Amino acid sequence: MRQLFNNPVRRILITGGAGFIGGALIRRLIDDSSLQVFNLDKLGYASNLLSINNKLASIKNVDDKYKFIKLDLCDKTILNDVIRQIDPDLVFHLAAESHVDRSIDGPKVFLESNIVGTFNLLECIREHLERLDDERKSFFRFLHISTDEVYGSLGSGGYFSEDSPYSPRSPYSATKASSDHLVDAWHHTYNIPSIITNCSNNYGPWQFPEKLIPLAIYNALHSKNIPMYGDGSNVREWLFVDDHVNALISVANRGKIGMSYCIGSSEELSNLDVLTFICEYLDEYNLSQLPYKRLIKSVEDRKGHDFRYSLNSTLIREELGWKPDYTFKEGLKLTIDWYIKNINWCEVVLNKKKK
C-alpha cells in the first residue's frame, strides 16, 4: 500500500483508538508499513479492541507497527511520560464520551473526559513540542476530532459551516464545544499546530449498539421494539465511517494549521426515514415472516432534542479534494450485512456493559 502521508510522519498517536471512529482510523493506518501507530484508550464501556486485533492478525511484524496503551487522559503525570516515550509526529485526538443520552443522565464524566482530558493532552503536547527540533516541528500536527452538535440546532433550512457560531444545547455538545475552544486557544497562545474537524453523524460496522442505526438493527434481529424519539421527524446528516477516516487523513496531509473543517455527506434523513430504510433492507433478507417496520415504536422524546443538523462541507471538498465514496444507502447495506454476520459481537459487548 502506498504511504498515506506526504510528509515525514512516522509515529502517530491516536487517543480513543478503541472507539468506533478511532478503531476505523487505526485499521486504515496500520496498512501503511511506514507508520508506527500508538493507541491510547482508557477502555470505557463502549471500547472495542477486537476490530483492531482482527486486522492485526494479518499484519507482519505487528510489534513494530502498533502498540496499545491503557490510559485515562485525566492522569496527566502518566500521560506526559507516555507521550515522551512515544515521541509522536502526528496526533489524532478522538478520546471522548460521546452519547448524548448518557450526558443528560450523568454529565460529570463528560466534563472530566472531554474537557479535562483535552486540557491535559494539550499541555503534554506543548511540552512535547519544546523537545522537537525545527524540522520535526515543521510537520507536527495535532488533529482534534469534534462534532456538528457544537453548533446547536437548525430549523428546516440552512447549514452549519466553519464560520457558524457555537451554540451547544446538551451536556455532551457543551463539553465538545469547550474542548474545541481549548484547542483553538492553545493554538493561538502556545502555537500548537492544531486543526479541528467537525463531523456529522457517523455509522458503519463495529459501532456500539446503543446509537440509532446499530440499535435498530440489533433490536430488529431480536424481534424487539425499535425505539424512535417522538414522531421521528428529527433530521441528521449521515456519514459512513470509512469516508470520515479518509477525510481525517486528507486533513492531516493538506489541512491548514489553525483551521476548522466541516465533514459531512450532504445526505440528510429523518430518524423515521433511517429506521424505515433499515427495516426495508432487513425485509430483503427474509429473516422474518412479518415486516420489520411493525417494530418501530415512538418513545418519549429526548430532553432538549435538537431538530436538525446539516453541514456545508464545501471547504474540505474544494480545498483538500475530499468527497465521500459511499452513498447512505450503500453504506447502510454494508452496515446491515456486517451486523447480521456479527450479531454475536453485539451480544458480547452488551453483556460487558452490564457487568
Image: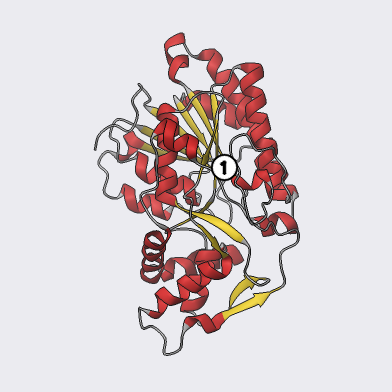
Evaluate whether residue 44 shows in this view. Answer: yes
Q: Secondary structure at mark 1?
A: loop
Q: Residue at x 48, y 38 (%)?
A: 314
State how many labels appear. 1
Quadrant that contains the N terminus:
top left
Q: Please state the horizontal and vertical placement of residue 305, each as a whole percent of the image.
A: 71, 59
Tell me: residue 43, above or below residue 120. below
Q: Residue at x 37, y 38 (%)?
A: 66
Is residue 158 toward the left or the right of residue 19 in the image? Answer: right
Tell me: residue 113, above or below residue 154. above
Quadrant that contains the C terminus:
bottom right
- Residue that protrudes farthest toward the bottom in the picture: 289
Q: Please state the horizontal and vertical placement of residue 167, each as a whole percent of the image.
A: 72, 43
Q: Nearer the viewer, residue 206 or 306?
A: 306
Q: Nearer the viewer, residue 70 or 46?
A: 46
Q: Badge 1: few (under 14), some or many (20 or more) residues near its Cα, within 10 Å? A: many
In which quadrant of the rendered view does residue 344 lie? Answer: bottom left
Is residue 342 toward the left or the right of residue 227 in the image? Answer: left
Evaluate whether residue 75 shows in this view. Answer: no
Is residue 143 toward the left or the right of residue 51 in the image? Answer: right
Tell me: residue 182, above or below residue 332. above
**Amino acid type of the residue that numbered disc 1 sits on in the rendered structure:** Ala
In which quadrant of the rendered view does residue 64 lie? Answer: top left
Image coloring type: secondary structure
Residue that mark 1 sits on: 95
In which quadrant of the rendered view does residue 2 lie? Answer: top left
Q: Nearer the viewer, residue 111 or 189?
A: 189
Q: Nearer the viewer, residue 121 or 167?
A: 167
- Residue that protrudes farthest toward the top in the picture: 134
Q: Residue at x 41, y 55 (%)?
A: 50
Q: Please state the horizontal and vertical placement of residue 306, each as a whole percent of the image.
A: 69, 56
Q: Please state the horizontal and vertical placement of residue 321, each as a whole percent of the image.
A: 38, 35
